[in-house]
Image: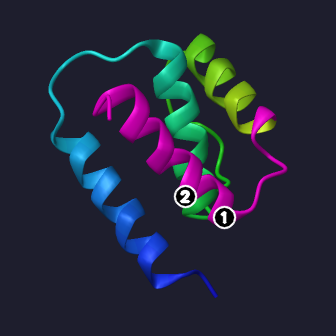
Amino acid sequence: MINEELYDRFDEAVAFLNSYTEPLPADLLLKLYAYFKIANKNYNNPGSKTPLINAFKANALIQAQNISIEEAMQSYIDLVDKEVKKT
């Protein structure tokens, strides 16, 4: 079972990022995308109408495929803290 504190911190990081209005680098967005998908056990194919974007998203998922849900949540939190919040 996922640690409740970790889940709360992940939820807060997602909410923060969803309200963030500044542009973010594409490589950071792809990492966040992969961690989010893994953390939410959503293994569906990327749904962009642009094949190139789908390829980048699929590649990001492949690179992160061997991490656990908890690791994905923590990695997402860490990226938001370090790269977005700059803490």
Height in image: 79 above or below 83? below
> What is the crowding at mark 1: few (fewer than 14 residues within 10 Å), some, or many (at least 20)?
some
For the C terminus, which image quadrant? top left
Task: Please tell me which residue lies in front, 68 or 56.
Answer: 68
Q: Secondary structure at mark 1?
A: helix
Tell me which residue sits at (64%, 66%) in the image.
Answer: 70
Tell me which residue sits at (40%, 26%) in the image.
Answer: 83
Residue 10: image quadrant is bottom left
Q: Is residue 43 left or right of residue 62?
A: left
Residue 80: image quadrant is top left
Q: Are circles 1 and 2 on residues that touch, CB within 8 Å?
A: yes
> What is the crowding at mark 2: few (fewer than 14 residues within 10 Å), some, or many (at least 20)?
many
- Assess whether residue 7 is covered by the magenta stretch: no
Tell me which residue sits at (64%, 51%) in the image.
Answer: 44
Residue 75 at x, y = what percent? 58, 47
- Assess whether residue 86 is covered by the magenta stretch: yes
